[in-house]
Amino acid sequence: MNLSGDPVTWVAVLTAIGALVGIAKFWMEMGATRQQASSAQAQAIAAHAAVEILKSVVSDLGRETAREYATHEALRTSEERMTAAVSGMRDEIRGLNERIDKFIVGVFNRDP
């Protein structure tokens, strides 16, 4: 094969070399892409596991919160008991004020 002067032969040789380089580069990049895909898959699996753990913790927290904190009904009955107690205290204070008033009137109406 004489490569000394035929430009078509030179173009064919250069094209063949370019094609071989392109094929080699393609497969090298394909290997790197596969490694990145494997790494991304491992990260996705780890993230999924972390989400499952977090979901479990949040679920446990929700159950604990429901168990620890008062319900609407319990708050309503507690408020009713507190209102009744304050109302009873108000009546007791009024009665005490009436007795104090009677005592004061009795002290000033006394004959010396």
Image (cartoon, helix red, strand yellow):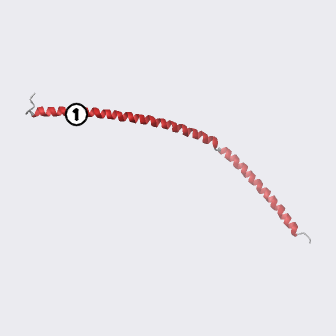
- Rendered residue at 64%/42% (across/down): 68
Question: In the image, is 101 to the left or to the right of 26?
Answer: right
Residue at left offset 81%, top offset 59%: 96
Task: Give the residue at mark 1.
Answer: 21
Number of labels in the image equals 1
* Few, some or many residues within 10 Å of mark 1 (<14, 14–19, 20+): few
For label 1, the SS is helix
Q: In which quarter of the image is residue 19?
A: top left
Q: Where is residue 50 in the image (x, y as percent from the top left)?
A: 48, 37
Taking depth in this image into account, of 13 and 89 the one nearest to the observer is: 13
In this rendering, is residue 110 above or below 20?
below
Residue occupying the point 83% across, 63% down: 100
Q: List the single residue furthest toward the left.
A: 5
Q: Compared to 61, does 86 lie above or below?
A: below
Q: Out of 88 and 12, give the one closest to the viewer.
A: 12
Q: What residue type is labelled 1?
A: Val
Q: In which quarter of the image is residue 7?
A: top left
> Which residue shows up at 8% across the image and 33% down it?
6
Location of residue 67 by image quarter: top right
Q: Quadrant for the N terminus, please.
A: top left
- Left/right of residue 5 with respect to residue 46 in the rendered view: left
Quick one: which residue is furthest to the bottom in this view? Answer: 112
Seen in the image, is 74 located left or right of residue 2?
right
Q: Position of residue 110 (x, y in %)?
A: 90, 69
* Location of the C terminus (image quadrant): bottom right
Residue 105, relative to residue 70: is it above or below?
below
Comparing 110 with 2, the one in front is: 2
Task: From the top left corner, tell me how far across and down residue 39 is, in percent.
Answer: 39, 35
Q: Is 49 left or right of 33, judged from the image as shown?
A: right
Q: Position of residue 48 (x, y in %)?
A: 46, 36
Kindly give the residue lying farthest to the right in the view shown. Answer: 112
